[in-house]
Image (cartoon, rainbow, N blue to C red):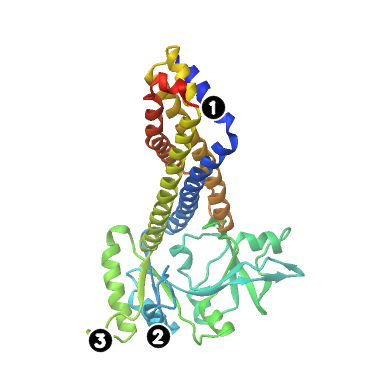
């Protein structure tokens, strides 16, 4: 028999018992779906996080009261970190003075979900209102398209001025220049002194829905109590990064009034450390998904073996007839192995399709970039092939080893 005939007979046999074949495929589909879905979602989120943080550059680090953490905030360590002293504006200003001539220092605080209004027009409630100083643009890779940046005088005098992103320009000033216009954000008026060049999106969120005001004005308008500031420090270049970090930690300990034996009561983070923290969580999710999927696939493989053994019993006489007219042992073996592999691969293909759709659906809900995990898809097909051969070999060998005389007598 030629190979094409063996494949045709195998597919015909599967078509005779559609429901049974479909239920057997379902086990493979569920196992592959679980791993491909998780891998797709994690890959999309990982790419979004890495591209967003990498855009800020590798020469910048941040001091905060408590670093961003993917762990539970209600843990013992989480509560201990939350009880640290706030980083005040006085401390941040003193730190900036100590680092003058060494690195650019951006002092920041802010809140999201704000809405800006002008002349009856409104933005969506997604404006990020940030209080900062003149170094924010450099540290965060923004540029001024029209107008000017914040100045030290704006910060020292707490002037009610603002730089706005392109999303605010589009919504509030569709046909006029925004410079020197006064917009309202959370009940406070700010005069526009500059417009930021478009920066696109990061983590699926627009970076152009932003309004920057002097940090002192922010604290005056919205209060400084129970508010901890962030301090971004940009090293002169990558070669001086480590030296700048060492000097910055020393300066930060000084302004916090720490003694030599005291532990740091602040955290330092960089883009690389945030990427590494997310990667650790992502790797744990992937390992967990692989473990669950492995169990599901083994169970599905046992189902394939069971259904193929039933098929061998039902088709014993057919096997005897084929052997009596010249079918060889390898032909029978190949037919039943192909049936097993086809069931496994078909289930795997459906699992990959559903996994990609489901994983990207979750990624879109989280504003991440859509991806297709080619490596995992090919790995899934390879695993399905191995399962089909591994769990289908014994039934196929049993069918191929039947004695043709005894098979013909079978009822």
| Residue on which the image places disc 3 | 259
Residue at 46 percent of width and 57 percent of height: 49
Q: Residue at x 26, y 71 (%)?
A: 246
Give the foreground label among 1 and 2: 1
Q: Quadrant for the N terminus, please.
A: top left
Instruction: From the viewer's side, name the closer residue of 368 and 329.
Output: 329
- In the rendered image, residue 71, in percent from the top left (x then y), is placed at 41, 70
Q: How would you rate the neighbour count of disc 2 (Cα within 10 Å): few for under 14, some for 14-19, many for 20 or more? A: some
Give 138 or 351, whichever is nearer the viewer.
351
- Left or right of 248? Residue 90 is right
Q: Image quadrant of residue 406?
A: top left
Callouts 3 and 1 close, C-beta under 8 Å: no
Q: Secondary structure at mark 1?
A: helix
135, above or below 30, in the image: below
Q: Which residue is more in the foreground, 96 or 83? A: 83
Where's residue 329, x and y in %?
Answer: 37, 20
- Using the numbered discs, state the Cα–Cα distance from disc 2 to disc 3 in whole angstroms: 15 Å
| Image x and y of residue 125, in percent | 66, 68
């Amino acid at each position: 028999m030629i190979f094409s005939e063996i494949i045709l007979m195998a597919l015909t046999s599967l078509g005779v018992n559609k429901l049974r074949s479909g239920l057997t495929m379902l086990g493979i589909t569920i196992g592959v779906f679980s791993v491909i879905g998780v891998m797709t979602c994690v890959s999309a989120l990982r790419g979004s996080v890495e591209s967003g943080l990498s855009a800020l550059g590798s020469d910048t680090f941040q001091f905060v009261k408590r670093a961003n953490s993917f762990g539970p905030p209600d843990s013992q360590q989480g509560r201990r970190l939350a009880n640290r002293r706030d980083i005040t504006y006085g401390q941040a200003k003193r730190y900036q003075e100590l680092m003058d001539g060494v690195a650019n220092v951006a002092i920041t605080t802010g809140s999201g979900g704000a809405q800006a209004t002008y002349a009856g027009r409104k933005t969506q409630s997604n404006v990020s209102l940030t209080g900062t100083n003149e170094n924010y643009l450099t540290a965060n890779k923004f540029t001024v398209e029209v107008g000017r940046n914040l100045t030290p005088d704006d910060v020292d005098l707490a002037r009610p001025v603002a730089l706005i992103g392109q999303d605010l320009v589009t919504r509030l000033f569709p046909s006029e220049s925004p410079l020197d216009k006064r917009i309202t954000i959370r009940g406070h008026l700010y005069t526009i002194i500059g417009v930021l060049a478009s920066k696109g999106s990061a983590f699926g969120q627009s970076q152009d829905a932003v309004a920057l005001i002097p940090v002192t004005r922010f604290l005056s308008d919205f209060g400084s109590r129970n508010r901890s500031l962030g301090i971004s420090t940009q090293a002169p270049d990558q070669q001086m990064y480590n030296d700048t970090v060492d000097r910055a930690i020393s300066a930060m300990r000084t302004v916090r009034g720490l003694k030599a034996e005291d532990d740091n009561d602040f955290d330092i983070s960089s883009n690389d450390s945030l990427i590494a923290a997310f990667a650790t969580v992502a790797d744990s999710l992937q390992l967990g998904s692989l473990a669950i999927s492995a169990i599901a696939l083994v169970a599905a493989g046992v189902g394939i073996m069971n259904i193929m053994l039933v098929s061998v019993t039902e088709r014993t006489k057919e096997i005897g007839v084929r052997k009596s007219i010249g079918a060889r042992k390898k032909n029978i073996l190949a037919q039943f192995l192909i049936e097993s592999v086809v069931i496994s691969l078909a289930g795997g293909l459906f699992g990959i399709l559903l996994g990609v759709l489901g994983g990207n659906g979750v990624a879109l809900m989280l504003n991440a970039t859509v991806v297709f995990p080619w490596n995992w898809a090919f790995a899934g097909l390879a695993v399905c092939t191995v399962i089909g051969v591994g769990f289908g070999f014994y039934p196929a060998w049993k069918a191929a080893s039947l004695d043709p005389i005894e098979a013909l007598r079978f009822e």
